Structure formats: structure tokens, C-alpha cells
């Protein structure tokens, strides 16, 4: 029997260990494993490699993904769905493991409804997937963001500045919230609560009236002002309809 595995969306720590674990377990149980390159793009184009113990040797500490990744949405490509279904059959897959976040697993969910056997592995640094407490990739992102905020303190204090650190998290404020708390931020702004700029200014002024000469503000990339607007550098969107 044969199973496939692909990685989609952004890269994050833990992808190669997942691939390695799947291959080792599958081969131990008598399955053949096909690696699909570059996410859903690879399944549309039938771009694959055979995975075995030799191909996964030494990848445990390696970042990124040996399979490559993309943000391709087969439902946005002309004939994409038909090609995915045809190649799934042509590869003689009894199941597919999709390692990804909101977008990758959103496609996986639709394919299950189309009758394909797809198993999702929750991967996203934003930690914004249901049915799991922590997605892999989140812990590393949290630690890196916290370290960056820690380093801002000395510069902010030395130069008497209010410094704003923007972190990832399109619609979920987990990174901003937890890194902000861990890093001792004075204000944390997350998408779940619209920003009242007057309230933010009042909080910072109150802190400075106590004799403090600097402040740290942590803001999630998806945070919005109270009026409902989001500050954007450009209006372009990706294949999943998200602002770049």
C-alpha cells in the first residue's frame, strides 16, 4: 500500500521531523511513501519523489522542508481539482498526509468531502487551528519573538523611546499576546480586540508619568483599529484570498 505526504504554506521548525516520522512509521508497517513536492502544486503537476530511510537520513535537525512548499490552491487553478483527483488515483495512494496550516488543511478538508482519504497535521506558527492546543512551529516563533522583545528593552531605555514590535499572526494574537507577556511589553495589540489609539496613548502616558522614559508595544500583524481598518502596505492577495 502507498501513502503520500506533502507540506504546504509557510515553512516552520518541525516539518522535516514530521516527514521523517511518517516515513519511518509507514515503512515499519509495510507502506510505501511518496513525497509530493511543493505542496498542492506538486499534486496538480504530479511532481513526486519516493521517500525511504536513505532520503530521510540526517534531516531531523534541518530546518525548512525537504519536500519544498508553496501556497498553491488547487481550487483557484483551472482544472486544479480534477488534476489533484486524477493524480491521487494515478499514484495509487490509499491516503495522503497534508502537513500545513489554515489554508493547506482547508483544502484537505474540501478534498475529504470529495471522497479522498486525507489526514491533516496541524502546522502553523500562528497557532490558529481548532482541535489542537498548540500547533508545531508556534513554540519556536514564540521564543524568537520573546527574545527580540527582550533585546528591544535596552535600546528603548537607552534612547528614551517608545518602540513598536510587529509580530506575525494574521487573525490570531497568540504570538503577540504570549511573547508580549513573556517579554514584559507595556501594551499588546491583537486582532481579537480592535485598537483604540486614544486608549493606547493614555496607557503609555500614564506609564511615563510614573517616571518611566521608555515603553514597548507589541502588535500582531492582523490587528485593526477600532474603526475596522487595517493598515496595509499593498492590496495584493494570495491564492487563498489573504492580504499579502
Image (tube, helix red, strand yellow):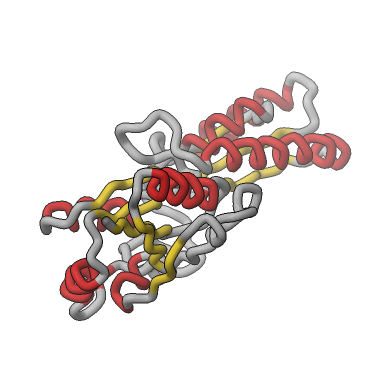
Q: Is residue 138 left or right of residue 82?
A: right
Q: Is residue 106 left or right of residue 140?
A: left
Query: 88 or 179: which is nearer to us?
Result: 88
Picture quarter with the N terminus: bottom left
User: In the figure, residue 42 lies in which quadrant?
Assistant: bottom left
Picture quarter with the C terminus: bottom left
Position in image of residue 46 (x %, y %): 32, 76
In the image, residue 35 above or below residue 133:
below
Position in image of residue 100 (x %, y %): 39, 52
Position in image of residue 93 (x %, y %): 25, 61
User: In the figure, residue 178 lies in which quadrant?
Assistant: top right
Observer able to see residue 118: yes
Observer able to see residue 223: no
Q: Is residue 32 left or right of residue 64?
A: left
Query: 165 or 158: which is nearer to us?
Result: 165
Query: 132 or 226: which is nearer to us?
Result: 132
Residue at figure coordinates x 57%, y 47% from the top left: 13
Q: Residue furthest right?
A: 158
Q: Residue furthest top?
A: 210
Query: 185 or 56: which is nearer to us?
Result: 56
Residue at figure coordinates x 31%, y 36% from the top left: 130
Residue at figure coordinates x 71%, y 42% from the top left: 148
In the image, residue 162 above or below residue 209:
below
Q: Is residue 36 left or right of residue 125?
A: left
**Total labels drawn:** 0
Position in image of residue 224 (x %, y %): 42, 46
Residue at figure coordinates x 41%, y 44% from the top left: 28
Amino acid at each position: 500500500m502507498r501513502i503520500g505526504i506533502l507540506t504546504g504554506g509557510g515553512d516552520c521548525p518541525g516539518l522535516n521531523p514530521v516527514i521523517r516520522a511518517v516515513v519511518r512509521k509507514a515503512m515499519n508497517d509495510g507502506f510505501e511513501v511518496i513525497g509530493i513536492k511543493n505542496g498542492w502544486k506538486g499534486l496538480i503537476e504530479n511532481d513526486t519523489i519516493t521517500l525511504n530511510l536513505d532520503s530521510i537520513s540526517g534531516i531531523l535537525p534541518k530546518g525548512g522542508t525537504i519536500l519544498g512548499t508553496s501556497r498553491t490552491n488547487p481550487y483557484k487553478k483551472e482544472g486544479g481539482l480534477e488534476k489533484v483527483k486524477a493524480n491521487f488515483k494515478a499514484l495509487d495512494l490509499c491516503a495522503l498526509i497534508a502537513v500545513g496550516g489554515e489554508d493547506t488543511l482547508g483544502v484537505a478538508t474540501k478534498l475529504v468531502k470529495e471522497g479522498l482519504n486525507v489526514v491533516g497535521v496541524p502546522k502553523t506558527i500562528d497557532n490558529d487551528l481548532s482541535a489542537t492546543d498548540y500547533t508545531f512551529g508556534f513554540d519556536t516563533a514564540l521564543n524568537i519573538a520573546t527574545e527580540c522583545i527582550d533585546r528591544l528593552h535596552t535600546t528603548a531605555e537607552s534612547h528614551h523611546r517608545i518602540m513598536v514590535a510587529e509580530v506575525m499572526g494574521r487573525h490570531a494574537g497568540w504570538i503577540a499576546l504570549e511573547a508580549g507577556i513573556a517579554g514584559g511589553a507595556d501594551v499588546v495589540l491583537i486582532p481579537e480586540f480592535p485598537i483604540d489609539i486614544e486608549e493606547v496613548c493614555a496607557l503609555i502616558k500614564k506609564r511615563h508619568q510614573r517616571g518611566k522614559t521608555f515603553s514597548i508595544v507589541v502588535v500582531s500583524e492582523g490587528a485593526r483599529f477600532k474603526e475596522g481598518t487595517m493598515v496595509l502596505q499593498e492590496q495584493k492577495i494570495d491564492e487563498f484570498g489573504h492580504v499579502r
